[in-house]
Image (cartoon, grey):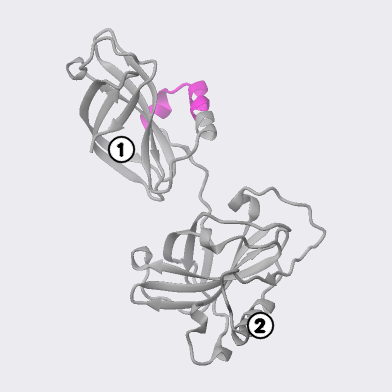
Amino acid sequence: MLSIFRRKNNDKVKKSGLDSSVSSSDLLNEEAEPAADAEIETELSIHPAWNIPSEQMYVLRFLNNELSPLKPNQISLSGIEIKPEDNGIEVTAFVRNSLNKGIKFEQVSLLLLDSDKQVIARHEFNLTELGEVPGRSSRPWTFIFPASAIQKSEFSLEDWTLAFELKQKHSLDLHSTWEKSIAEDDKQKLEKLLENIQPPKSGEINFMGLSAKLADSGDLHVTVLIRNGHEKNVQLQQLPLQVEDAAGDKVAGGGFKLEDFEVKANTSKPWTFIFPSSLVTKDNPDLSNWKVYPLQ
């Protein structure tokens, strides 16, 4: 049941939150559709699995009718009510769709902002249960921000905002030494590579091998992309790595100490690790296909 109905008198329900909107193309990669309407009213849409009593349906219709029209090709969140609880914050809002077709959500990062637009909480929600929000409709839903997601404990219960957090495009992060030495063509190749590969998952750090070469000295030079899917910068100080060749055999392994080494949020940083010959454990490895990964 929606939190707004956990009260003795539904007539006291009033909208305490503000509205936020994003472009459908920015959020869902939906192409903008031509629309003759300058403003689009959204009809109330109830989840098919919900059985809403008539008196509660009246409240929802009233709240929905009070909403401002949307512009074409917008996805909007319209805050209704916020309830701090012992285990988190419960937020009720309309999810609104001004497109002419239905939309579905998967993993979505949401921000809860106070009246000064400061972050109260940030959390990633799996909205597959929301189902398909029909075209030109508003669907009420309750979002629970767990205690671990809360960044601010004191805030006004008026004029708050629930908003989609649009992630910036995953980009290249070059260390200052690379910035000074890398050729422009090589830099463009790395940027093009990032455009054509799937970015790391949210909260994930992974390693993508770029090149592996054995020097005449017997040292193994391995260049990798360190890919940061976190929303925060990540500092690396100690990094134990292992390299395997096409046969799945260990080629080299060892620990690396890094100083002032940071991978910025939602970026990939290239770096070359040199395994001295003493750490190379296989003669004539097949490096036509190889992988590198951190040891736990």
Tell me, yes or no, whether the highlighted magenta stretch contains residue 117: no
- Residue 261: numbered disc: 1
| Residue 125: % across, % down | 46, 59
Badge 1 amino acid: Phe
Tell me: residue 108, above or below residue 112.
above
Badge 2 amino acid: Phe
* Left or right position of 266 against 249: right
- Which residue, given by chain and number where applicable, does mark 2 sit on? 62
> Could you say which is closer to the camera, residue 111 or residue 45?
45
Query: Which image quadrant: the C terminus?
Result: top left
> Could you say which is closer to the camera, residue 15 or residue 8?
8
| Residue 31: % across, % down | 69, 47
SS label for mark 2? helix
Magenta highlight range: 175-190
| Residue depicted at x 54% and y 32% | 196
| Residue 146: % across, % down | 37, 67
Tell me, yes or no, whether the highlighted magenta stretch contains residue 177: yes
Tell me: residue 38, above or below residue 172.
below
| Residue depicted at x 64% and y 84% | 58
* Left or right position of 257 against 143: left
SS label for mark 1? strand
Looking at the magenta stretch, what is its main secondary structure?
Answer: helix
Q: Residues within 10 Å of mark 1 (few under 14, many from 20)?
A: some
